[in-house]
Amino acid sequence: MRKKAHIMLVEDNISDQVMVERALEDGKIACDLSILNNGRQALDKLHEMVKLEQLPDLVLMDINMPLMDGKQTLQAIRATASLRHLPIVMLTTSNRDKDVLESYQLGVNAYLTKPVLESAFIHTIRQLENFWFELVVLPENTK
């Protein structure tokens, strides 16, 4: 039996936060979910988690957020030795070619656009969960 996954969601839009929570619940995805409202909060939390050796298994991050956006946060994570191995998926409404290219150039592992329909969103989250927690081998939490 696999361990319960820990997913960190970095998202400022409350309705999108609820949609991800609902998709995980409806998809019967066994995980712990932490929700942070912007990149600054996420970086602070990740640095705390490094000390506790309890990093998330996957980070889902929006691009458009106040204080520190997703691309700035991604860049900061990839510049930090103890965090750079974290799998990060941009989960955003933006399908602009510039955002996609810049995200990959900064080291994102995958880029997904948020479906508008809840049923499609749930399907996307299920596929994401299947890929990241069934097919892919993830690193153990390390300092």
Image (cartoon, grey):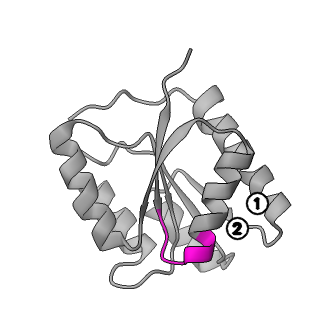
Camera-near label (2 vs 1) is: 1
Q: Amino acid at mark 2?
A: Lys
Q: Are marks 2 and 1 in contact (CB under 8 Å)?
A: yes
Say few, some or many: other residues with alpha carbon within 10 Å of mark 2 (under 14 / 14 to 19 / 20 or more). Answer: many
Binning the other alpha carbons within 10 Å of mark 1 as few (below 14), some (14 to 19) or many (20 upward) gives some
The span shown in magenta is 10-16
Task: Please tell me the numbered disc located at residue 47.
Answer: none
Up/down of 46 relative to 133, above or below: below
Which residue lies most toward the top here?
A: 1
Amino acid under disc 1: Phe
The mark found on residue 121 in the picture is: 1
Q: Residue at x 39, y 45 (%)?
A: 86
Identity of the residue furthest to the left in this view? 51
Picture coordinates of residue 90 (x, y %)? 55, 62
Quarter of the image with the C terminus is top left
Determine the image quadrant of residue 73: bottom left
> Mark on residue 114?
2
At 80% from the left edge and 51% from the top edge, which residue is drawn?
A: 123
- Residues under labels 2 and 1: Cα distance? 7 Å
